[in-house]
Image: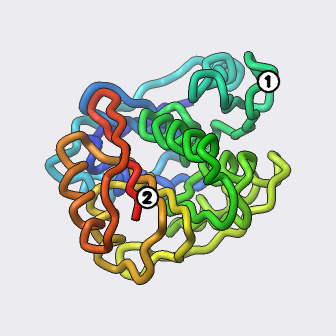
Amino acid sequence: MIRLAVRCRPDQAELVLAELVQLAPGGVEEEQGPGWVEYAIYGAEGELPDLGEVEAAAGDDLVEITSERIPDDWADRWRDFHEPTVLAGGRVVIRPDWRPSPEPDALDVVIDPGQAFGTGAHPTTRMCVELLVALADRGFGTGPLVDLGTGSAVLAIIAAKLGWSPVLGVDHELPAIKAAGENAGINGVEIAFERKNLRAEAAPSAPTVVANLTAPVLRDVAANLAEPPERLILSGLLTGEAQEVADGFGAHGLAVAERLDSGDWSALLLTA
């Protein structure tokens, strides 16, 4: 078995992932570190795809591409590395189905880590969850919610379990939509999913919107916004990008009510 990994700078992560998902729809592994995000795919020697398009997408922000042979028992060892992720001070747990929750009273979310469209470990997801839980605690956890760039539907599932309804997840990638629907079913929540190009089309409206995307996509969302939400959670932002993106939504009457920072990343709560 061969592990083929692409490491890029965070602001190109979405583009690289989009290309890899097309080449390896069965799943992509994600890891992060200071100033980089790494995506990996696995396959037998001679079966892995050419990464020319991925290299072109990353451009000068490509850090490195590595290829390594892994032990034959990798499939079993891989499961050992995936531990439950505890979020929002123990209020939410995201876990693979073979791991029990370490917090019996927490909101429990089961996500297949074999499909890397977001498993809750990234700081941007963590901060979005914190802001969602805080909104629910303040009495805003009801009514319609839209999750832009839903990925594996982690945030949409958490929102549905916190009380928002109906919940709509939006993504441009068909493999992500498929994985999101499967994860919603596993977690026993009703979520609608819609494929939409948020760089060219107006985002669906709702009183509460969460958008864990990159800064370029968020700038396009702001430019195409037809009906501003009452509450908007933004993340996927490097710390130096946060204010500029917030300013784009400021033209729609939205102002920063709360900001969270974690390492190189930021999340914002904007309100009308």
Residue sitting at 64 percent across and 39 percent down? 114
In the image, taking residue 199 as reference, residue 207 lies left or right, namely right
In depth, the one of 218 and 185 nearer the eye is 218
- The amino acid type, in three-letter code, at marker 1 is Asp
Residue sitting at 26 percent across and 42 percent down? 238
- Label 1–label 2 contact, CB within 8 A: no
Residue sitting at 56 percent across and 57 percent down? 150
In the image, taking residue 231 as reference, residue 9 lies left or right, namely left
State the CA–CA distance, disc 1 to disc 2. Answer: 36 Å
Q: Which numbered disc covers residue 257?
A: none
Q: Quadrant of residue 108?
A: top right
Residue 32's x, y, as percent? 38, 30
In depth, the one of 57 and 219 nearer the eye is 219
Dot 2 falls on a residue whose secondary structure is helix
Q: Quadrant of residue 44?
A: top right
Q: Which residue is mark 1?
A: 105
- The amino acid type, in three-letter code, at marker 2 is Ala
Residue 259 appears in the rendering: yes
Residue sitting at 33 percent across and 54 percent down? 214
Rendered view: 217 above or below 58: below
Rendered view: 122 above or below 100: below
Q: Residues within 10 Å of mark 2 (few under 14, many from 20)?
A: some
In depth, the one of 226 and 94 nearer the eye is 226
Q: Which residue is mark 2?
A: 18
Residue 233's x, y, as percent? 45, 53
Q: Quadrant of the N terminus?
A: top right
Dot 1 falls on a residue whose secondary structure is loop
Q: Quadrant of the C terminus?
A: bottom left
Front of the two marks 1 and 2: 1
Q: Quadrant of residue 170?
A: bottom right
The number of numbered badges drawn on the structure is 2
